[in-house]
Image (cartoon, rainbow, N blue to C red):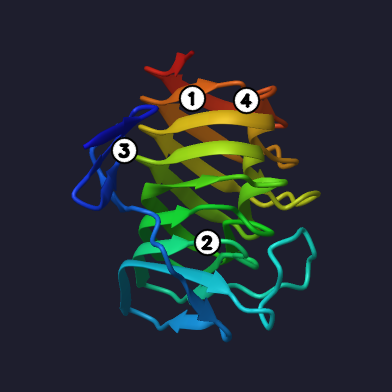
Amino acid sequence: MKRLAGTVILSGLLVCGFGQALPEKASAAEVVHKTIVVEQGQTYDGKGKRLIAGPELGDGSQREDQKPIFKVENGATLKNVVLGAPAADGVHTYGNASISNVVWEDVGEDALTVKSEGNVTINGGSARLAADKIFQINKASTFTVKNFTADQGGKFIRQLGGSTFKAVVNIDNCTITNMKEAIFRTDSSTSSVTMTNTRYSKVGKKWIGVKHITERNNHEF
């Protein structure tokens, strides 16, 4: 058993401080040459598989024309996957989506982008090393992140720049560290954030442009 900065590695699983089990970094990765589509109502369980993007998808830079490794359709679930580098444009969601226990070892253009309206829930997992934002919201949605660890990025969550649609953001039981700008940035006066039971440190201005903020039982360290 090895303990590292608030985590415990036990029997090949990485266990975060919140108790959820995450796949430990694998020694080899499967290269994805074409976006994997998780079809409507279906579940993709990677069972700890580690994936990286082939050159057909992108190089994981901030170039805007990259493709996602996963496209998650309405009502679909993606779980138990490790995305290594390069990760291209990570994960795109279309409609309601459940993302469970996904690890982004080195965020590409974005870790996840909301591409159409819906309720998106991210439960468990982690992301780090984002040159800009980790999560991008491009359409009106309810976006919930819980039991998640994020480290080293520009912004934890960013609503599409210049947009005025309403995004409802919920953050619960997360650890967020080393964001250069903010936890959530928006240009919309109607968007809101509720953050509860969350530990954070070195997150810039915390909120940028957010007019409706609710906070409970959080701890800055």
* Disc 2/disc 3 C-alpha distance (Å): 18 Å
Give the number of the mark in front: 4 or 3: 3
Q: Earlier in the sequence, mark 2 or mark 4?
A: 2
Residue pointed to by mark 1: 214
The amino acid at mark 2 is Gly
Q: Amino acid at mark 3?
A: Cys
Q: Secondary structure at mark 2?
A: loop
Q: Verify CB contact (< 8 Å) between mark 1 and mark 4.
A: no
Mark 4, secondary structure of its residue: loop
Q: Which residue is mark 2?
A: 84
Pointer 4: what residue?
203
**Label 4 crowd (10 A; few <14 / some 14-19 / many >=20):** many
Vertical order, 91 against 173 (above or below):
below
Q: Is residue 154 left or right of residue 26?
A: right
Q: Is residue 18 visible?
A: no
Residue 66's quadrant in the figure? Answer: bottom right
Residue 139 placement (x, y as % from top left): 62, 60
| Dot label at residue 198 | none
Q: Measured along the vertical axis of the image, is residue 99 above or below residue 69?
A: above
Q: Secondary structure at mark 3?
A: loop
Q: Residue at the spot x=70%, y=40% of the render?
A: 186
